[in-house]
Image (spheres, rainbow, N blue to C red):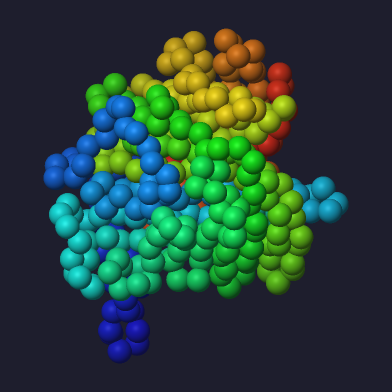
Amino acid sequence: MSASGTITRRAFAGGALALALGGKSVAQGFAGLGENAEGFAAVTPGKQFAFPADHGPHPEFRIEWWYVTANLTDASGAAYGTQWTLFRQAMKPGGPAEGWANQQVWMGHAAVTSAATHRFSETFARGGVGQAGVDATPFRAGIDAWEIRGLDGFDAQTVAPLELKASAADFSATLRLAADRPLVLQGDHGYSRKSDRGQASYYYSQPFYKASGRIVIDDRPVDVTGMAWMDREWSSQPLAADQTGWDWFSLHLPGDEKLMLYRLRQKDGRENLFGNWITPDGRSTEIAASGNSIAPVAITEIDGRKLPTAWRVALPARGLAIETTPLNPKSWMGTSFPYWEGPVRFTGSHAGIGYLEMTGY
């Protein structure tokens, strides 16, 4: 809000999102994602994905995101991480309204992490006024000056090559992302269950990106290379009302295998574990619902919250038994709906790197 008391369009957009979701994070799952979705489109099995169209927005569903994480190193071998996310949230169902009456609210998150620092930023926009949005062809997702966009030769099946840009007062990131394998459908051919009561999303990933570019932390530029992962999800009710949050891993395994694994937590202490094992040729197989486990092994206190920042992960049928450790245990995203997100390293039966996201703590 300005000194004169006039509400800026950014504050209005952020306030609209807070009004749409605020106060529901406890009663209706993290960030209100368990709220009743009457009037919005339903997620059902058997969807036939179509690209490039499905790279674009799905306004008939309540929420979706375009989500990139990158594990990076500099010439000396020092590790870094970068996150870039664009969220779309519909405040009510129905066809699009014009201008400021548009019911779509957009939110962007970006972060750069090193072993010593974690810098993040958040920005908001209201749909209908040209400040944020996504185009499937040519592909571009952006909010203000933050963007991921297709470059010359863009292939809708590999979602590459891309350029990623984000900047704030104390950090920036510019990356080029290349991939030589098609995107991967998560869950059951893209239908990703979140509970045994019907909550689900449509979900695909591009886990095979090779990344190169530059990050800047506190005016210090660093040239980096590494691996990146994009997640695309959309839904109308991705959580049940009694699910309080999730612990989500994207892991780069030896030999270019990949693992996506997440635990959804309920108020009564029960858990739901889901995931997919991805082979180097892109075959994606659901992880069995039973016989696997993830459990915290170390706690970090941040702003009065106790967060499980190191984990033990076991998938006996895959011969996987690992422990993850964070690059920076203080990778807290103090955004409107706060959560932990940062790069991790793991050792044990397999060794590698990846990302961890934790919500609802």
Residue 357, above or below 349? below
Q: Is residue 169 visible?
A: yes
Q: Residue at x 66, y 23 (%)?
A: 322
For residue 229, what is the image quadrant?
top right
Can you name the residue that lies furthest to the front here? 153
Can you name the residue that lies furthest to the bottom here? 4
Q: Which of the two residues, 72 or 57, is positioned nearer the viewer here?
A: 57
Q: Residue at x 18, y 66 (%)?
A: 97
Q: Which of the two residues, 142 or 169, is positioned nearer the viewer here?
A: 142
Residue 24 in percent (x, y) is at: 25, 47
Residue 180, above or below 4? above
Q: Which of the two residues, 46 or 249, is positioned nearer the viewer here?
A: 46
Image-based side of 184 in relation to 26, left or right: right
Residue 235 in percent (x, y) is at: 30, 41
- Looking at the figure, which quarter contains the N terminus? bottom left
Q: Is residue 124 visible?
A: no
Image-based side of 321 in relation to 40, left or right: right
Residue 256 in percent (x, y) is at: 68, 30
Q: Residue at x 26, y 39 (%)?
A: 237
